[in-house]
Amino acid sequence: MSQDNISLPPLSRRGFLAGAGGTVAGLTAANAANGQPQNLPSIPDEATGRPFPEAELQMPLPPEERLGWAVVGLGSFALNHVIPAITRSQTCELTALVSGNADKAARVAENYGVPDASIYSYDNFDDIANDENIDIVYIVLPNGLHAEYTIRALEAGKHVMCEKPMANTVQECRDMIAAAEAADRKLMIAYRAHFEPHNQRALQMKRDGEFGDVKMLLGHTMRTLDLSRPRDEWRVLRDLAGGGSMMDIGIYALNGALYFLEETPTRLVATIENPPDDVRFQEVEDMLTVQMGFGSGALANLATSYTMNENRIQLLGTRGSGLLNPATSYSGNELIEIGDLGSRTVPVGQTAATQFTGEIDHLSRAVLEDFEPRTPGAMGLRDVALIKAMYASAERNSWVELNPDGTLVEA
Ligand code: NDP
């Protein structure tokens, strides 16, 4: 079962009974003309319990029902975003850590109340199979290690959230999906846009026809790569990163384009340009631009780089456009509607911060309620396949044709 829409939860049985039992007598005599009760409500004037209010937000799960999450790789993203989001979530608790740095892991464990016995290293990682407090494993390692640790976690009987990009190669992605099927466990790729309120609103506006017929999309996602930061060191090494700016940051424009256009391209042409003599770009790309053509006739133009900063996605329709700028930041995203007569910021009402807990709670609920996650392994495979097709196109200096799953049509 797919869960594309955010639905309000049913009230618990206890809440329902409280609501029914708490109905005041006056409410039974409804005025047919305006639907309002005819009598003033009869409520005691001392402190008293009242019915369960209408559910506007999902209730958190009670502590004993929450799923246990293990985080693998205590780097920049894990410590600054993943672990804080797990602690803010409604469905999970942080129950284990996996790290190659025992001192760091001990410090993090102490701060988050994870017992020492639940700290694992890469060497004894497979022992997580015997840890009943771990339901879901979140892989936050360099890209080249995603496949190995995802498969080992699945074989240990755990569900997996894997960071983007899913893996370095299409074959690795296929192996990960096969391992999830063999273990009958969920596999979700940690794309944020699908849980980010401004992106969700832009998709809704497009579906409602507010931009007219959306026929083109522009996506520019870039960031400067700084080798003085430890987190950027592995990103210049092909074995660990799988590629350059497109694998790391351009993938947001790619995944966003397909999220908004709701189809997979049938052909693409890409160009790569690297500054000569820059040590960062000996093994991975700096600038990449790609044009993608879709079966519907839509076109998308994407650009990425490791030497500039830009983060915007624009949906261009026959009646106007929707500009996300920034589109995929951790906070401060904005949606601007542009028409003939000017532009306006679209009020969204939720902050971008909900995207992190949104994706984490989504996988917990996918496990508890047994539905396919909104961003499954097949989506991760599709995006990796498309990036590999971009590399092939740039290498061949020509358009390439694509299969429905995003892989290259080989001549
Ligand atoms: P970091 O370099 O900060 O963290 C990676 C961690 O992986 C290290 O701290 C280390 O943890 C572990 N590790 C194990 N083996 C190696 C190795 N050989 N080289 C380097 N690190 C190793 O990277 P990030 O946190 O920035 O990125 C991690 C993953 O998260 C990537 O896949 C990236 O694409 C993704 N990411 C996703 C984002 C999103 O918005 N969804 C944003 C940023 C990153 P330890 O010391 O504990 O062993």
Image (spheres, rainbow, N blue to C red):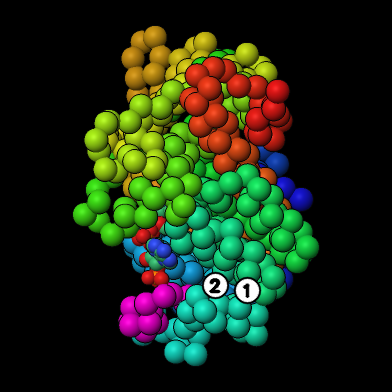
State the image quarter where residue 40 is shown: bottom right
Q: What element carries label 1?
A: loop
Q: In this picture, which residue range is highlighted in magenta?
A: 94-109
At a point 65% along the width and 85% down the height, the residue shown is: 130
Report the side of 311 relative to 373 (left or right): left
Q: How crowded is mark 1: few (under 14 residues within 10 Å), some or many (20 or more)?
A: many
Mark 2 residue type: Trp
Q: Is mark 2 on a helix, strand or loop?
A: strand
Could you say which is closer to the camera, residue 390 or residue 201? Answer: 390
At a point 48% along the width and 69% down the height, the residue shown is: 72
State the image quarter where residue 126 is shown: bottom right
Distance between the alpha carbons at the discs numbered 1 and 2: 6 Å
Is label 1 in contact with label 2 (beta carbons under 8 Å)? yes
Measuring from the top left, give residue 239's x and y in whole percent: 46, 52
- Whether residue 385 can be seen here: yes
Residue pointed to by mark 2: 69
